[in-house]
Image: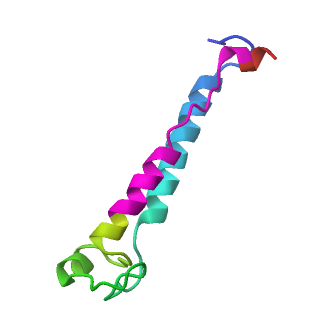
Amino acid sequence: MAVGWAKDGAVQEQIDAGVADAVKRARSRLGHGESRTHCEACEEPIPEARRNALPGVRLCVQCQSEIEKTDAGSSLYNRRGSKDSQLK
C-alpha cells in the first residue's frame, strides 16, 4: 500500500534501515581483542571479573555508563519526517 507519494514498500524500507542501523551500532560496541587492565578514559583499574565477562573491554563501568547516557539521546529521531516536509 502506497502512502502519499511514497512508492510501495517505502515504509518497510525505512523500518529495515532503522533495524540495520541499530544492529550495526550494537556490533560496533562489541569488544574484541584483549581487555585493558585500566580504563582508557580515567585510568582507574578495571576489575578482573569485568575483563573476563567482556572481551576487549576498554572502559570502567562508570565511564561506560556515561558514554551510554550520551549515546541514548542521539539515536532517537524521526526518520520519516512530517507530512508537511514531504509536501514541500
77 relative to 72, above or below: above
Between 72 and 11, the one lying in front of the other is 72
Magenta stretch holds residue 69? yes
Q: How many tags in the picture?
A: 0
Instruction: Identify which residue, 78 or 19, lies in the foreground.
Output: 78
Q: Residue at x 30, y 84 (%)?
A: 44
Which residue sits at x=32%, y=77%?
Answer: 55
Name the quadrant of the N terminus.
Answer: top right
**Residue displayed at 49% across by 63% down:** 28
Asked whether 73 or 79 is in front, the reply is 73
Q: From the viewer's perspective, is 26 left or right of 46? A: right
Instruction: Determine the residue located farthest toward the bottom in the rendered image.
Output: 37
Q: Where is residue 79 in the image (x, y as percent from the top left)?
A: 61, 32
Give the percent coordinates (x, y) of residue 14: 60, 32
Residue at the (37%, 79%) spot, across then down: 56
Relative image position of residue 51 (x, y in whole percent): 26, 80
Q: Position of residue 41 (x, y in %)?
A: 42, 78
Is 17 or 29 nearer to us in this picture?
A: 29
- Whether residue 6 appears in this view of the structure is no
